[in-house]
Amino acid sequence: MKTIRYNIKKKRGKEMKEVKRSSRKLRFRWDRLFLLVVGVVAAVFLVVKGIHLVLHDEYKQYTTYNEDNKADFQTERKEMESDTQYVSLFYPTKEDDSEFQSLIDEYLKQYESLEDQDEMKEVHYMDYEAVNLNQRYYSFTFHYQMFDESGTLLKEEYNTLNYDAGRKAKMNIDDVLRRDYETLLNDDFTSLDGLNFRLLESGFDVFEEGNFASKKTYPYKNNETYLRLNDPTINANAPKDVIYPAKKEHDTSKKRIAFTFDDGPHYEITSQIMDAFDEYGGSATFFMLGSNVERYPEIVKDMAKRGFEIGNHSYNHPDNLIGASQEDVFEQVYGTNDLLFQTCGYDAKLFRPPFGMYDAFMEEHLHTTIALWSIDTLDWKSRDAAAIKENVLANIHDGATILMHDLYPSTLEAVKELLPILHEQGYEFVSMSELV
Ligand code: ZN
């Protein structure tokens, strides 16, 4: 037993020794392997890093931007890289304006899924130029360039984005220019479709889309008549105290009708008609004569402030505008819009030609929509509240446009009687623009 035990112990001792020996051998091999692996990994890492550095050096010119033309906008950068593209875009931010931010995000979207031209890797680079007019109008010119890997310019584009921080909305050319501005631009551009524009400190630029070389600069000075910009420092004809109308909310699921009043404003009746509509949170449209706008500017201002719609009905109600000279038509329509613009800062979007008579020229060449009616109350003829009321109730329908004149006490009386009845019938009183 003893011997056996000894043998076993001895054997165990041998086994252990053997194990120890073999483990020593093994560890030795692991060390060398470890060193080898570390060496290889380090080498590969350095090579990759080296290539990366070289590549990044190649792109370095696309990681900087011009800091001198950014007004007071902060600049951010979007960088993306794939096997086939390197994208580096500089763009403006205004953290306190989410509408503006989303407009920029929307603009950048076009660069998210750039199409590959071929096997070659392309570089897409964009810088921008900013103008900030009195913290009100922002104007950006984006300069986009596409290069091949050796830095050769393949494509170049200038695009503009204009923003009204007062209205918190993107600006179109119609937000900048008014009246017959085509007359101004037609001298320099054969087509007015898709024109790009941008605002500068002392004037504005216009150019054909994709053709920056066609750019023409128009100073604000001497072009006042065409400017819609409501900024006191820009020489537009807008009043210094532009009126921002109250917003009237209407239930769009309800039946809707538009009351329209022609030939005013009247020094007494117009305000009382507005009071009647205010009782129902209702709106209405007033097609005014320029000659009366001159007489009662305070009523027009009040109308704008209270959120009623301002319409154009010519300057002095000529018998027939059809066949009149272009000069006369422009004077009647734009002349009246000039008066409205100078009074409250807005042009009328709707034009109701006197007697509802118009021609193709008026449809095509006036920056307004021709606005007629579906129910003629003949209030000017009857001057009788009961007759007017009867006429309306007999013809009323969803989407109706009712023609009246804010000149007669009988019309005011009819309105006061009609509104509760029509309200009871489930009608909402909206402006004509809302109905259209
Ligand atoms: Zn009229």
Image (cartoon, rainbow, N blue to C red):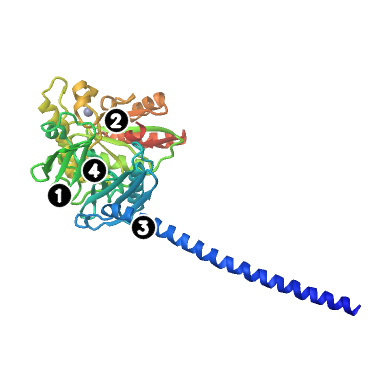
Dot in front, 2 or 1: 1
Task: Tell whether label 3 touches label 4 (CB within 8 Å).
Answer: no
Q: Quadrant of residue 362?
A: top left
Q: Secondary structure at mark 4?
A: loop
What's under tag 3, amino acid-wise? Gly
Q: Residue 412: percent from the left, percent from the top?
A: 31, 36
Task: Tell whether label 2 touches label 4 (CB within 8 Å).
Answer: no
Specify whether 222 is left or right of 383: left
Q: Residue 323: percent from the left, percent from the top?
A: 14, 19
The answer to which of marks 4 and 3 sits earlier in the sequence is 3
How many other residues sit within 10 Å of disc 3, few (<14), some (14-19) or many (≥20)?
few
Specify whether 30 is left or right of 359: right
Label 2 belongs to which residue?
A: 404
Dot in front, 3 or 2: 3
User: Can you say whether 32 is above or below 59 in the image?
Assistant: below
Residue nearest the viewer, comparing 44 with 209 = 44
Q: Secondary structure at mark 2?
A: strand
Label 3 belongs to which residue?
A: 50
Q: Residue 66: percent from the left, percent from the top?
A: 21, 55
Quadrant the C terminus occupies: top left
What's under tag 4, amino acid-wise? Thr
The answer to which of marks 3 and 1 sits earlier in the sequence is 3
Q: Residue 303: percent from the left, percent from the top?
A: 27, 43
What's under tag 2, amino acid-wise? Met
Dot in front, 4 or 1: 4
Q: CA distance from mark 4 to mark 2?
A: 68 Å
Task: Tell whether label 1 touches label 3 (CB within 8 Å).
Answer: no
The answer to which of marks 2 and 1 sits earlier in the sequence is 1
Label 4 belongs to which residue?
A: 152
Q: CA distance from mark 3 to mark 1?
A: 55 Å
